[in-house]
Amino acid sequence: MFLLNQQTNEKIILIARRHWIVILSGIITFVIFIFGGVIGLTFVRNLMSSHLELARYSNLIWLGFLFFFHLLLILIFKFLIDYYLDAWIITTERIIDIDQKGFFHREVSEFRISKVQDVTVEVNGILATFLDYGDVKVETAGESSTNFIFYQIPNPNKAKEIILQQLKKESASL
């Protein structure tokens, strides 16, 4: 992966994205909505065949279901784009947060490893504990101190150790 403004000695150590279970749970949610829509469509179709006064509104009902399924497809596409394009990159010099906020809105933030003040790992829940994923919160020093949160990444303790090792190397070289 090519980083903008990557220095010659800078090496990428870790590229983290959300854990695969996050996308799986999202897909399961969308499948439930699709099945709900198909069941609703079947129910309405059977209802229209038995009630002739509802048959007058069949085009409007079909349009409503078509709108529902198109909206669902757009949401699935947005979810997949957000999952794939959100990334956290740890290099030998910096930590970079790439956050895809929408289809055409991306925020890229970065700070130097030497600015790291605290690194915290949060693993919440049984599933997160068994599958070893969680959030890594990185706090920086300075007047405009910012917090980076790596959401739902696999092996959060490994990411924490990598950051702390790079911080140790950075402070040893000073």
Image (cartoon, grey):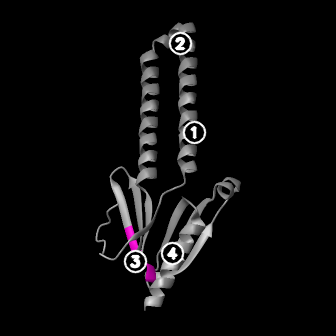
**Disc 1 or 3, which lies upstream in sequence?**
1
- Quadrant of the image for the N terminus? bottom left
Marks 2/4: CA–CA distance: 62 Å
Nearer to us of marks 3 and 2 is 3
Q: Around disc 2, counting alpha carbons within 10 Å, would you say few (fewer than 14), some (14 to 19), or many (20 or more)?
A: some
Query: Around disc 4, counting alpha carbons within 10 Å, would you say few (fewer than 14), some (14 to 19), or many (20 or more)?
Result: many
Q: Mark 2 vs mark 4: which is more N-terminal? A: 2
* Amino acid type of the residue tagged 4 in the rendering: Ile
Residue at image mark 4: 163
From the top left corner, tell me how far across and down residue 120 is, in percent.
59, 73
**Which numbered dot is residue 100?**
none
Q: Residues within 10 Å of mark 1 (few under 14, many from 20)?
A: few
Residue name at image x 31 percent, y 63 percent = 2
Q: Which residue is mark 1?
A: 28
Foreground disc of the pair 1, 4: 4
* Residue appearing at x 29%, y 75% in the figure: 8
Distance (Cα) linking label 1 and label 3: 39 Å
- Given the image, on which type of amino acid does mark 3 rest? Glu
Front one among 13 and 45: 13
Q: Is residue 141 visible?
A: no
| Along the viewing direction, whichever of 159 and 58 lies nearer the viewer | 159
